[in-house]
C-alpha cells in the first residue's frame, strides 16, 4: 500500500474526532487528501498521537492551512456535531472498518483494496444500475486511502472501462 506500518511505535489509540474535523476543514482548501495522508503517516509510520491538537496544528502547517484559524476551530465546537453525524451515518450504512467506499449511495466496499478490486467494485455497481451510477457517480470515501497512487491507478482503470460516461466525470474524491 505504500505505507511502512510501524505498529511498535503506536502507544495508544487516539480519539480521532479532531483529526476528522481537520480533514473536513482541509476540504475547503483542496488539501483534504494531503491532510489524510499526513494523519496516516504520523500515526501508522511514526506512532504519533493524532488526537493531540499540537500534532494536528503541525499537519495543518505542513499542508499550508491557516494554523491560527485551525487552532481557533479546534478550541471551539465547530463541526463537532457534523463530524459525529457523518460517523453515525457511516455506521448506519454498516461501515465497521476503514477505508470504506460507497458508490452511488448503494454499494459499499470496506477495507484496503488493490486497484483491480476497486475497479471491479465500481464496474459491478455500474452494471447493476447502468447510467444511474455512471451519471451521478458519487464516490464517498468514508475514510481516506493511505496511498493516493492507488486512487490514481483506479481512476485510470475506471476511465478505460468508461465508467465515467456523461458530461461531468468526477475530478477528485
Image (cartoon, rainbow, N blue to C red):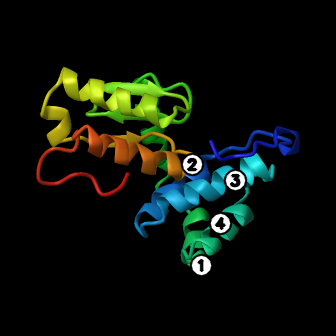
Q: Are marks 1 and 4 in contact (CB under 8 Å)?
A: no
Q: CA distance from mark 2 to mark 1?
A: 29 Å
Residue appearing at x 38%, y 51% in the figure: 173
Q: CA distance from mark 4 to mark 2?
A: 17 Å
Residue appearing at x 50%, y 41% in the figure: 143
Horizontal relation, residue 87 to residue 122: left or right: right
Q: Position of residue 149 (x, y in %)?
A: 52, 51
In this view of the protein, can residue 19 be seen by the observer?
yes
SS at mark 2 in the image: loop
- 65 vs 155, nearest the viewer: 155
Q: Are marks 1 and 3 in contact (CB under 8 Å)?
A: no
Q: CA distance from mark 1 to mark 3?
A: 23 Å
Task: From the image, tell me which residue sits under label 4.
Answer: 59
Q: Position of residue 69 (x, y in %)?
A: 54, 75
Front disc: 4 or 2: 2
Q: Are marks 4 and 3 in contact (CB under 8 Å)?
A: no
In this view of the protein, can residue 77 be seen by the observer?
no
Residue appearing at x 59%, y 63% in the figure: 74
Front disc: 1 or 4: 4
SS at mark 4 in the image: helix
State the image quarter where residue 88 is shown. Answer: top left
Task: From the image, tell me which residue sits under label 2.
Answer: 147
- Dot 3 or dot 2, earlier in sequence: 3
SS at mark 3 in the image: helix
Task: From the image, tell me which residue sits under label 1.
Answer: 68
- 137 vs 12, nearest the viewer: 137
Q: Position of residue 169 (x, y in %)?
A: 22, 52
- Indicate whether 144 appears above or below 56: above
- Dot 4 or dot 2, earlier in sequence: 4
Task: From the image, tell me which residue sits under label 3.
Answer: 41
Front disc: 2 or 1: 2
Amino acid at each position: 500500500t505504500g505505507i511502512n506500518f510501524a505498529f511498535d511505535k503506536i502507544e495508544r489509540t487516539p480519539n480521532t474526532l479532531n483529526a476528522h474535523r481537520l480533514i473536513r476543514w482541509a476540504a475547503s482548501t483542496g488539501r483534504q487528501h494531503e491532510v489524510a495522508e499526513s494523519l496516516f503517516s504520523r500515526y501508522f509510520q511514526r506512532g504519533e498521537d493524532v488526537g493531540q491538537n499540537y500534532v494536528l496544528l503541525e499537519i495543518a502547517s505542513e499542508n499550508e492551512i491557516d494554523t491560527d484559524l485551525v487552532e481557533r476551530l479546534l478550541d471551539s465546537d465547530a463541526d463537532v456535531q457534523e463530524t459525529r453525524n457523518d460517523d453515525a451515518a457511516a455506521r448506519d450504512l454498516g461501515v465497521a472498518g476503514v477505508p470504506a467506499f460507497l458508490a452511488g449511495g448503494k454499494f459499499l466496499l470496506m477495507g484496503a483494496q488493490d486497484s483491480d478490486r476497486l475497479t471491479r467494485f465500481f464496474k459491478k455497481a455500474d452494471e447493476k444500475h447502468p447510467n444511474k451510477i455512471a451519471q451521478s457517480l458519487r464516490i464517498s470515501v468514508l475514510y481516506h486511502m493511505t496511498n493516493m497512487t492507488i486512487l490514481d491507478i483506479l481512476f485510470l482503470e475506471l476511465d478505460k472501462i468508461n465508467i465515467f460516461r456523461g458530461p461531468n466525470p468526477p475530478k477528485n474524491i
